[in-house]
Image (cartoon, rainbow, N blue to C red):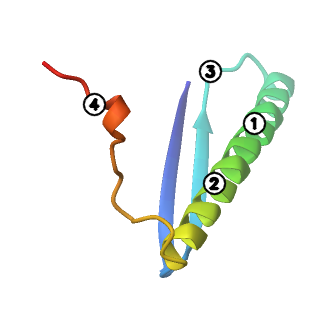
Amino acid sequence: GEIFTRLIPLDERMTSIVVEFRAPVMNVEQRDLLGKAYLRLYQRLWDEDEQMMRRRQELIDAGKITAEPQMRKSAKRQF
């Protein structure tokens, strides 16, 4: 199957989202069950990601972190 996601910016901090699930199914009952399962999972993942991104933006706005990712010195590898 495939998942197509389209984000539509509404303003600086809001988007609308359209998600399309495409998966082969045997019948209408299977389609409905699979669709509900995909929707529950995607909703949960989206909500978790949104919560993390909102917190990140709060920290950026407060000047506690920068918008650009930083690599910790301990994470740098020497080649």
Q: Is residue 46 left or right of residue 41?
A: left
Residue at the spot of label 1: 41
Front tag of 2 and 1:
2
Q: Residues within 10 Å of mark 4 (few under 14, many from 20)?
A: few
Q: Tell me the SS state at disc 1.
A: helix
Mark 3 touches mark 4? (CB < 8 Å): no
Sequence-first disc among 2 and 1? 1
Q: Amino acid at mark 1?
A: Leu
> Which part of the image, by quadrant, shows the N terminus?
top right
Task: Quickly name the residue at label 4.
Answer: 76
Mark 4 or mark 2, which has the lower sequence index?
Answer: 2
In the rendering, which numbered label is found on residue 52? 2
Residue designated by label 3 = 24
Between marks 4 and 1 in the image, the one whose residue lies nearer the viewer: 4
x and y, in percent, of residue 14 in the image? 57, 75
The kind of residue on which mark 3 rests is Pro
- Asked whether the residues under the numbered discs 4 and 2 touch, taking CB atoms below 8 Å apart as contact, a structural biologist would say no
Local secondary structure at mark 4: loop
Residue 2 in the image, given as x and y percentages of width and height = 52, 30
Pick whichever, 77 or 27, lies toward us. 77
Element type at mark 2 = helix
- What is the distance, in whole Å, between disc 4 and disc 2 at their CAs? 24 Å
Q: Who is closer to the viewer here, 63 or 44?
A: 63
Q: Which amino acid is tagged 2?
A: Met
Residue 56 image offset from top left, x and y in percent: 56, 62
Q: Which tag is nearer the camera, tag 4 or tag 2?
A: 4
